[in-house]
Amino acid sequence: MKSWDDPDRYAHEHLLAFLEKAAHFNKGIVAVLFLIVSIGGEKLSSTGSFEVHVRSEFQPGVGLGSSGAFNVALSAAFLRFFGRSNEDETLDVHHASGSARGWIDIKKPTETSAILLNRWAYAAESIMHGQPSGIDNSISTFGGAVAFQSGTISVIPHVPPLKLAITNTKVPRSTKTLVGNVGALRKRFPPVFDPLIQSVEQISKTTLSIFHDYVHTNETEKHKELEANFEALMDVNQGILNAIGVGHQSLDLVVKLSAAYKLHSKLTGAGGGGCAITFIPTGTAEDDVEALRNDLSEAGFDCFDAKIGAAGAVFHSSLPNIFKA
């Protein structure tokens, strides 16, 4: 088996033990070197020196999946650079304005190439985080949206064009600590916690049903009903997440400020700080959205817009302007 075609074995057997020693505090750098050495393989000796330029608008460490996107971008670049994938293994992208700045000179990997790309990105994620779920690298690779259940990730083929605002509270948190605290409480009070966890699962399944209905109807009134149901589920989900101990007063403030404009918010990521998302339903007055941004800014938070249903990993036939600045 060639090294570049077997990322899982190389990630775990050759690097994870090393990370417990000298490279323990440099896992990001080791992940990059792992991708270069393993994907490059025997071609490194003939490649010569090269430079890697990275530009990102993601804020790291706040639950937005920045490391997943980073590892996907690097894996895609190295697979192409070292000749492990080529232009014959790409597809045209026709609807990427929400994720690729409206550039039209882009293609995306075929399904087979994307699967290999995703495996490499997950291997790098494993170096950086230990045992990640794989959600972040999968959504960055395949785009659209994904469903995660019992360790299995499936791509959702049709995603409604819902608009969200993301607020970074700038409150640091540790995912490992938060998860550990929830696990400890669950062991102490299983009859209390198990129904809460099951309710979160049902919220996710109901949301998937809402997504399906949304993209398969053109009725304005039906869209309003579905959006109202989505808002209600966000509120319930936020309440449950607070109940299991992953809330924070900064996130409660985001919920309170957005409620003043009849908008609904919930935490995202591990909670305990980090980021919150606010749903912006169809027909929301831009003045209200701008006023909310100002309120959040006055509270010391950063707020920016986002849409779901991005294109995922893409290749450019020419250098994007973002790298020419």
Image (tube, grey):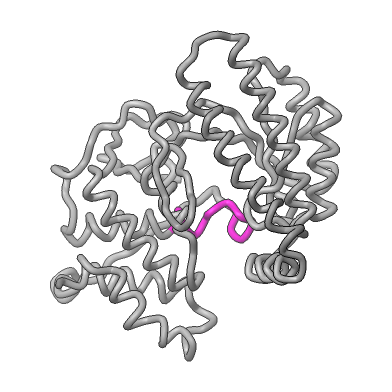
The percent coordinates of residue 131 (x first, y second) are: 48, 69
Verify whether residue 220 appears in magenta: no
Q: Which residues are magenta?
A: 59-70
- Residue at position x 66%, y 46% from top? 199
- Residue at position x 70%, y 47% from top? 267
Q: Is residue 30 left or right of residue 88?
A: right
Quarter of the rendering containing residue 73: bottom left
The percent coordinates of residue 99 (x first, y second) are: 45, 36
Q: In the figure, 296 relative to 118: above or below? A: above
Q: Is residue 150 left or right of residue 228?
A: left
Verify whether residue 69 appears in magenta: yes
Q: How many marks?
A: 0
Quarter of the rendering containing residue 189: bottom right
Q: Is residue 65 left or right of residue 107?
A: right
Give the position of the N terminus as an image quadrant. bottom left
**Front position in the image: 157 or 38:** 157
The percent coordinates of residue 191 (x first, y second) are: 74, 60
Which residue is farthest front? Answer: 191
**Front position in the image: 292 or 235:** 235
- Residue at position x 45%, y 58% from top? 151
- Residue at position x 37%, y 48% from top? 141
The percent coordinates of residue 295 (x first, y second) are: 83, 36
Q: In the figure, 113 relative to 78: above or below? A: above
